[in-house]
Structures are given as structure tokens and as C-alpha cells.
Image: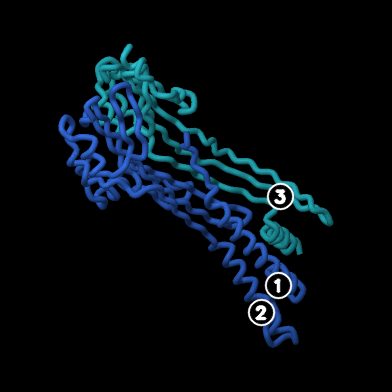
Amino acid sequence: MRVSLVFALCLSLLATSCVQFTYLGAYYDQPVEDAAFAGLVPGESSLQDCLDALGAPHVVQEYRVHGMSMAWGWTDEVGWGADVSYGFDESPLAASFSWDSVDRFVAGLVLFFDAELKLETVRRGSLADILPQRRPPASIEDIEKN
Amino acid sequence: MAYRPSILPELDLILCLQRMFAMLAGRALRAFQQVLCFGWGTTSADTPYANDMMNSRLSLLLVLSLFFASCAVGRQSTNDPIDATALSQLEPGKTTAGQVVSLFGGPTEVVQLGRRTAYLYSASTTKSAALILLVFNMGNQDTRTDRLWVFFDENDVLSHYGASMGTHRTQYAMPYEDIHEASDNEARDVKRPGVVEAK
């Protein structure tokens, strides 16, 4: 009797889908490995050295008019999630709750190059924090001035 | 920035499947109720309800088998993959912007860098896989991109370029699987013309 009740309870959970647990994975491109990055030296490495070592970036932006910044980003996350929903009898109301531990964290690497296209600075971390703000390109006057 | 993989494109499909299974589960519950009332040990010759019993059991087994086997897969692509064999025709100091456009078509993005310019060619493929057991679900989304950046000097002559080819490495997988294995990537690289040569 007890086994039947447990089985019936499990089956009722399946039927109503009122509780769900989820195991999620999210991948975006390949992480930049430390070994690929290790040989790059600020003040020495050229733009082509960096492109050869790391491949093509995801984002290229103007930096101090004649320089540029290049960014690589990737996501490699696995996590758990849960959903609970409940419909009230004789009422159009329903309540639901969702949660997941997948951090949507986009790791990244940003390289800054000077006007001579030599590597100037390197930043690593969350791409949202290290990526320079997008700005309109420099005006002709600025280009002439610099 | 649009680097936030999401399972939303697959959500409609999953919800649709869940509704279908919920409906079937309702029938299964009724069947289960009948089975509980009649008892598991009854054979077709024992009771006048034998045919109903048999049908109920078959329905129950059918629905349960659906629970354990349900899965969903999805695939999304943006732009055609970049022709990796054409990369060998790029010659810094010689190739012009016009020739690059002849080879690869119109760029996805053009960036001004002072007097220089850079063109981006990109494509992406996303493969999603989900195992749906109603109470416990597993899902995975893998997105890989092809990217080619070509940099031109103020005379529109190619000065540098960098390419990364990844769309062919996209995999249908479950979250517990390692989809970044080097040997797996190498095996896939070999099958795509021009990728091994471009490295």
C-alpha cells in the first residue's frame, strides 16, 4: 500500500508538472587557454602575434583614435535549475517560481594596442566589466589632430 | 554584447512536448487507478474486466516509455560558414579591400580604426539538446562561431588578418559531457576543408 502511494504521488507529480528540476549546460565558443596567452608580452607583441596566438576576436573597437582594442569572450557553464508552479482551484490565478544556478557569466580577455599596433595592456575577467564602452568612431578632426 | 546563450529558442518546443505528455499522463493516471483497483496479479482469464485491464496496462506502459525517452533537439544558424579554403588567398601588403569582398562577400560589420578599417565576417551555429522527463529535465546549448577579421591600412590594402573557425565543432550534447576535448575538435577540423591548412 505504501509503495503504491509513493508511486501514485510520483506519477501525479509527472502529470501536473508542478515541480521540475533542470540540469543545464551553456557553452559559447572555446575558452582562450592560458598557454596560448602566455607568450604575449605588453610592449613587445605585435597585432599579428596576438591574432596568430588567439585567433580572431569577437569584438574590435577603436582605442585612442589610432589604436584598437580586441576582445574574446566565452561561456562554459553548467548548473541546476528548479521550477515550481501551482494553479488555484476555481480561480484564473496561477503562481510559478523559477530559479537556476547557471551564472550566464561571459568570461573574456581584452587586449589594447597602441597606434603602432603593439600590445599595450591586457585585461582578463568578466567581459561585461572589462570591455570598453562602445563609442562613436573618432571624427576626421580628431584623426587629423592625432 | 550578445554573448548570452539562452535556451529560449527551444522553450516553445519543450512546453509543447510537456503539454502533450501532461495530457497523456492524465490518461495514464486513470489507467494506473484502474490497475490499483484491480490489482497487478490479475490475468486475462481471471475477471470480466480482463480486456479493460490489459488495455490499461498497455496504456500505462506506453505512456511511461514516452516519459523515459522524450528528448528534443534544435539547431540555429546565422550566416553561411566562412569558406576556410579562401583564406590562403589573403596576402597582407597585397590584397585589397575590393578583393576581400570578392572572396567573402559583404562583411557582417565594418569598424573604423582611425585611418584604418577592419571588416568582420562571422557565422554561428547553435545546437541544443534536451532530455525531458517532466520532473527532471536536462538541457544543453552549444554555440560556436566562425570569425574572420581583416584589417586594412589607410589605402585599403590588407595589413593583418585573423581567423577562427568553430561552427563545425558545435555538438549536440548533455550537460555532463565534455565538449571541448582537443581530440574531438581535431577530428572535426580534419573534415572541414581549409581549416587545418589555415592553422
Residue B67 vertical position relative to residue A45 in the rendered view, above or below: below
Q: What is the distance, in whole Å, between disc 1 and disc 2 at their CAs?
A: 8 Å
- Give neighbour class at mark 1: few <14, some 14-19, many 20+ (Cα, 10 Å): many
Question: Which colour is chain B painted?
Answer: blue
Indicate left or right for A82 with A54 as reference.
right
Residue drawn at x 61%, y 71% is: B61
Q: Report how far apart the C-alphas of labels 2 and 3 lie in the structure.
A: 32 Å
Q: Quick check: marks 1 and 2 in contact, CB under 8 Å?
A: yes
Whether labels 1 and 2 share one chain: yes
Task: Say which residue appears at 69% left-offset and 74% top-offset.
Answer: B40
Q: Name which residue lies at 44% across and 23% down.
A: A135
For image coordinates 35% across by 20% down, the residue present is A112
Could you say which is closer to the camera, residue A143 or residue B37? A143
Task: Determine the chain carrying the residue at label 2.
Answer: B
Residue B195 in sight: no
Picture quarter containing residue A99?
A: top right
Q: Residues within 10 Å of mark 2 (few under 14, many from 20)?
A: few
On the image, the x and y values in percent for residue B48 come to 75, 87
Which mark, by number, is residue B55?
2
Q: Amino acid at mark 3?
A: Ser
Q: Is residue A17 left or right of residue B170?
A: right
Tell me which chain the residue with mark 3 is part of. A
Task: Say which element carries label 2.
Answer: helix
Drawing shade for chain A: cyan
SS for dot 3: strand
Could you tell me if residue B190 is visible in this image? yes
Q: To which residue does mark 3 refer? A: A85
Residue type (three-letter) at the residue carrying disc 1: Ala
